Amino acid sequence: MFENEMVLRMAAQSQNEAFARVAAAAFAAQLDPTLSEIQDIKTVVSEAVTNAIIHGYPEKAAGQTVILTVKLRGREVYIEIEDEGCGIADLAAARQPLFTSRPDLERSGMGFTVMETFMDSIQVSSERGKGTKVMMVKQLSARADECTGE
Amino acid sequence: MLIDIYEKNRNLIVRVIGEIDHHALENTRDKIDKAFGRSNAKNMIFDFNDVSFMDSSAIGMVIGRYRLVEEKGGKLAAARISGDLRRIFEISGLMKIIACYQDIEAAIDGMV
């Protein structure tokens, strides 16, 4: 059971990448993360939302959305980014560092590697023609006033 | 994201200000490439001092410019990458290919 959660559905437009990462960080802020932890959360959300926009919806059309969900439990931050786009053709390949299906867009192929490095765990589920869901968890460090054992 | 481009001793200094992400880069790549093409510069130095955020889009951008500069026989370097931002560079292995300096002067000296 999570103690708090929020869900944001936004248009799959690149100008929303900045909004999504700030929204996720703003919601997680109630747990008083360190500046580094905030940066980590912003970065992984930026990666996953960008992937949803660029790869999930290669052909732009009205009504395409990205759903950002953030749930909190204790010091744990659970982040989910979901799209209803084309799905990942080869998930194993996509997870490989430096692999990108869009070198023409100068994509570095480091998105998943960044998410894996900055979060404690990441799971990806995808279905061709249906969409992709990226689920990540980060355990934040304890706050100073929690060391009293209360 | 804003960019401030100037030339110094045949080096094109590209100072990036603000947040680097996929959206911000869409119009910026061309600006940098055109400026490089129009200049007398042989090398390119990115100054990341005023960058408040970057994701892996920045890596793609640097690699793209690296290829462009290499083709013309020049060198590319990065300068003033702060704490948190260093991690993205390190994860990508870019630091093994591109020299990173503490300041612009050191980067310019390193180009020789």
Image (spheres, coloured by chain):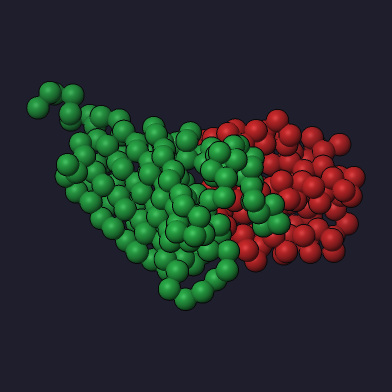
Chain colours: A green, B red
Task: Say left or right for A51 vs B30.
Answer: left
**Residue A59 image position (x, y, % from top left):** 57, 68
**Residue B29 image position (x, y, % from top left):** 69, 60
The residue most toward the left is: A150
Question: Residue at left 81%, top 58%?
Answer: B36
**B84 w.r.t. A82: above or below:** above
Question: Residue at left 20%, top 36%?
Answer: A74
Position of the C terminus of chain B by quadrant: top right
**Residue B58 image position (x, y, % from top left):** 61, 49
Task: Say left or right for A116 vs B67.
Answer: left
Along the line of sight, the residue nearer the viewer: B19 or A134: A134
Along the line of sight, the residue nearer the viewer: A114 or B54: A114
Can see residue A4?
yes
Position of the N terminus of chain B by quadrant: bottom right
Task: Say left or right for B86 vs A119.
Answer: right
The residue most toward the bottom is: A62
Count every numbered label the image shows and give the total: 0
Q: Quadrant of residue A34?
A: top left
Can see residue A106?
no
Question: Residue at left 89%, top 50%?
Answer: B72
Q: Quadrant of residue A146?
A: top left
**Residue B97 image position (x, y, % from top left):** 74, 34
Question: Residue at left 77%, top 46%?
Answer: B66
